[in-house]
Image: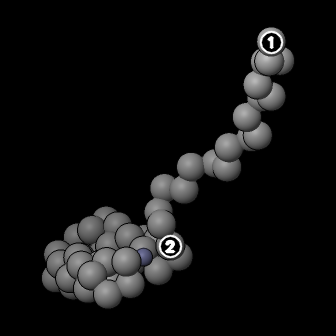
């Protein structure tokens, strides 16, 4: 009769953003959005799209 399985090791905390660059772009996007700078926000969306495509 097998003993009960050992408790799973502590899981690492969930990472909201996969990488620092994503985080940087996201922060910049939110900053631009808060400032009401739609052009900059749009530019960050494009930057994020490129980054996602090339780096992930
Ligand atoms: Zn990334």
Task: Name the residue that disc number 2 marks.
Answer: 19
Q: Does residue 55 appear to the left or right of 16 in the view shown?
A: left
When asked about the image quadrant of residue 49, the answer is bottom left
**So how many labels did they put on this image?**
2
Q: Are marks 1 and 2 in contact (CB under 8 Å)?
A: no
Q: Nearer the viewer, residue 48 or 54?
A: 54
Task: Name the residue that disc number 1 marks.
Answer: 1
Q: Is mark 1 within 8 Å of ligand 1?
A: no
Residue 54 in view here: yes
Q: Measure the C-alpha gap from mark 1 to mark 2.
A: 45 Å
Q: Indicate the position of residue 43 as horizontal and vertical percent values.
A: 21, 84
Q: Indicate the position of residue 36 as horizontal and vertical percent values.
A: 23, 70
Quadrant including the C terminus: bottom left
The residue sitting at 47% across, 63% down in the picture is 17
Q: Is mark 2 within 8 Å of ligand 1?
A: yes
Colour mode of the rendering = one colour
18 above or below 16?
Answer: below
The residue sitting at 48% across, 66% down in the picture is 18
Q: Secondary structure at mark 1?
A: loop
Judge the density around disc 1: few (<14), some (14-19), many (≥20) Cα neighbours within 10 Å.
few
Q: Nearer the viewer, residue 2 or 27?
A: 2
Q: Nearer the viewer, mark 1 or mark 2?
A: 1
When asked about the image quadrant of residue 32, the answer is bottom left
Q: Secondary structure at mark 2?
A: loop
Q: Does residue 48 appear to the left or right of 10 in the view shown?
A: left
Judge the density around disc 2: few (<14), some (14-19), many (≥20) Cα neighbours within 10 Å.
few
């Amino acid at each position: 009769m097998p003993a009960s399985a050992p408790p799973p090791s502590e899981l690492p905390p969930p990472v909201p953003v996969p990488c620092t660059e994503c985080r940087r772009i996201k922060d910049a996007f939110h900053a631009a959005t808060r400032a009401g700078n739609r052009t900059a926000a749009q530019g960050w969306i494009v930057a994020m799209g490129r980054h996602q495509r090339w780096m992930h």
